Image: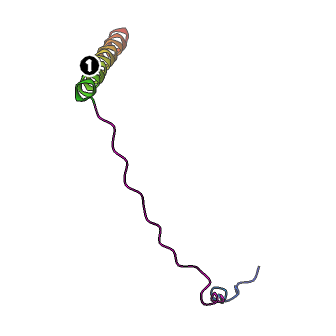
């Protein structure tokens, strides 16, 4: 291998596009759609159920962790 690396010559030369190569156009966006109505009572009930499931899973996990810890300490 040679210690000398070739000198960086820069990026390749680009040729500019001819004038008028793109047609000017303006895209007009349509009117935004309306959001569907939301049932806030159902959303709140679903969040409450999810919170309850999370709390029970946490409680069971902590109880299982302490059970394994106590069994591990008693056996040794």
- Please name the residue shown 47% across and 72% down the image: 26
- Please name the residue shown 69% across and 85% down the image: 5
Q: Quadrant of the C terminus?
A: top left
> In screen coordinates, is 32 left or right of 1?
left
Location of mark 1 (residue)? 52
Question: Which segment did they paint magenta?
Answer: 14-38
Which quadrant would residue 21 be assigned to in this image? bottom right
Q: How is the image coloured?
A: rainbow
Is 21 included in the stretch rendered in magenta? yes
Q: Position of residue 17 (x, y in %)?
A: 63, 87
Q: Mark 1: which secondary structure? A: helix
Which quadrant would residue 67 be assigned to in this image? top left
Residue situated in front as seen by the camera: 64 or 9: 9
Secondary structure mostly seen in the magenta stretch: loop
> In screen coordinates, is 11 left or right of 47?
right
Q: Position of residue 13 (x, y in %)?
A: 66, 89
| Label 1 crowd (10 A; few <14 / some 14-19 / many >=20) | few
- Please name the residue shown 75% across and 83% down the image: 2
Residue situated in front as seen by the camera: 43 or 66: 43
């Amino acid at each position: 291998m040679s210690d000398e690396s070739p000198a960086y010559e820069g990026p390749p030369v680009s040729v500019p596009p001819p004038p008028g190569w793109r047609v000017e156009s303006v895209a007009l966006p349509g009117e935004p759609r309306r959001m569907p109505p939301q049932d806030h009572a159902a959303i709140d009930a679903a969040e409450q159920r999810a919170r309850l499931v999370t709390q029970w899973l946490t409680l069971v996990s902590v109880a299982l962790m302490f059970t394994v810890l106590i069994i591990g300490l008693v056996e040794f």
